[in-house]
Image: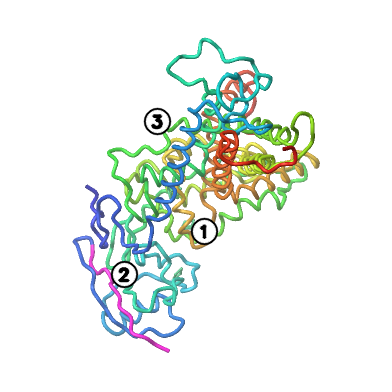
Amino acid sequence: MSSRRNFRVWRGDRAGGEFSNYAIEVDEGMVVLDAIHRIQAEQAADLAVRWNCKAGKCGSCSVEINGKPKLSCMTRMNSFAPDATISVQPLKAFPVIKDLVSDVSWNYEQNKKIPPFKPRARGADGKHRMLQRDVDRVQEFRKCIECYLCQNVCHILRDHDKKNSFVGPRFMIRLASLEMHPLDSADRLPAIKGEFGSGLCNITRCCTEVCPEHINITDNGIIPLKERVVDRFYDPLLWLACKFFSANRRS
Amino acid sequence: MRDTAVQGGHEIGFAANLRGDAWWLAPLLTFIGLSAFGIYATWAAFQGGYYWHGSYLSPFYSPPLFIDPAAPGAAPLSHAWFGAWPSWWPKFLPASPALLILIFPLSFRATCYYYRKAYYRAYFATPPACAVTALPQKDYRGETRLFLIQNLHRYALYAALVFIFILYYDAFAAFFRDGELGVGVGSVVLLINATLLALYTMGCHSLRHLIGGRLDSFSCGAVCGKLSHTAWKKVSCLNKNHMLFAWLSLFWVGFTDFYVRLAAMGVITDFNTWD
Ligand code: SF4
Ligand code: SF4
Ligand code: FES
Ligand code: FES
């Protein structure tokens, strides 16, 4: 069964633009990305949209649908009221290239700044060993598809534009996955507190709300990192104890 | 002004958004809920009386460090940890035992990771809801500077852990009147209160860190590794429901005071096995 649906799609580039209205037939089972493709095929051949897998796994099709950051390939048309007009915009936190396509390259630069995995020495038998229960935690973060919806919704980047002082939630969980790794031996805590800006996050959880992979970014990634930063820099008793015993803090 | 501010059809300015759903409902309910509790708790703490009925002690007044037995509805002097109300207490403040201890639960909740989210959204509008423009700030600093204090949450947690024992003791004592075992609606109300506070406290993010989350590897030896992993798993399980217990325990602690207060004032009759 198909029905006629109305869309408002933002068209433009860095110089400016506006919403254009389109009405198309939408078939049962279609997602917003299908509808965009139909608009492209039938009414606006030059409409720019980025996509790749259409299966929620490549993270390319991130846009804002009715004001909410979403993967357009995973947003079903039947999740909207039959008479609702659906607005589709490019991400707010990153510069527009054209229409629905934005330039997310700032994120690649952040990734490069993160000190890589540095395995500790092998065991006596020349092997690396880790327990499943130790890697369960970091495996959650490996689900990330780098859609940058969390980066886009984070008010520090989106509204306050503090791109110089905060790496954003996606890279906070990458840092967490390295910091919590049972075999890793690098120390990233001073940088997490410093240039990566963990103190700017006020744990208001929008990153977790929008993550299409349902990664618990705040509770399992950022808050544990903040607590580790407290251990190192803010806990007066631990600080005294460390001074006193000059203990190795990364046992 | 950043060059992307008006691109992509994104409006600029406070609370700008295209969401079209009731995004304001959650922060509004949070605002009403927290404000109502704050007003009631402040009022109740300043009363200095009607916090004791039979063997029930209001959790706002527990532990009673000093007691002024002359106040209406005050606990018997024998319940005070350090004796009669001190003469050094400033005259402009009511002789209320609550004022001496409320700082502990207050600082615990105020620095709780869940409540931080709740009030940053509902009171500070940073942001009011997701993809709704935050209140503009000249230089947003998050939890640095003044808010560095949030990093001391674990110290409030240590106090809160002690309070669990105190409140369970109060609940236990509420089942005895003049040495006689019994039960009243109030005893059950106090028991539920201690339990909800325990469930809230044991799901704390700082506790989750301290009990095991701080380790990269739970292999500090067979027993210790297993123990800390199990403990971490248990706390994590409560932690998933931290928001739920935050609200349930907040409501119930207020209700417990309200119940004891009304019973002490004689407005309601407490059904029990003693009278
Ligand atoms: S919780 Fe922190 S990182 Fe996540 S969106 Fe909010 S401010 Fe950004
Ligand atoms: S953490 Fe989630 S929202 Fe953020 S980039 Fe990865 S998959 Fe996308
Ligand atoms: S197209 Fe790959 S995630 Fe949507
Ligand atoms: S995080 Fe909520 S009580 Fe500690």
Q: Cβ of disc 3 within 8 Å of ligand 1?
A: no
Q: Name the residue under label 1.
A: A144
Q: Does the magenta stretch include residue A8?
A: yes
Colour scheme of this structure image?
Answer: rainbow
Q: Are marks 2 and 1 on the same chain?
A: yes
Ranked by sequence position, the earlier of labels 2 and 1 is 2
Q: Is mark 1 on a helix, strand or loop?
A: loop
Single out the residue that lies furthest toward the top. Answer: B87
Q: Mark 2 points at which residue?
A: A87
| Residue A63 image position (x, y, % from top left) | 37, 65
Q: Cβ of disc 2 within 8 Å of ligand 3?
A: no
In front of the other: label 3 or label 1? 3
- Vertical arrangement, residue A144 with respect to residue A204, above or below: below
What segment carries the magenta color? A1-13
- Vertical arrangement, residue A5 with respect to residue B121, above or below: below
- Vertical arrangement, residue A235 with respect to residue A17, above or below: above
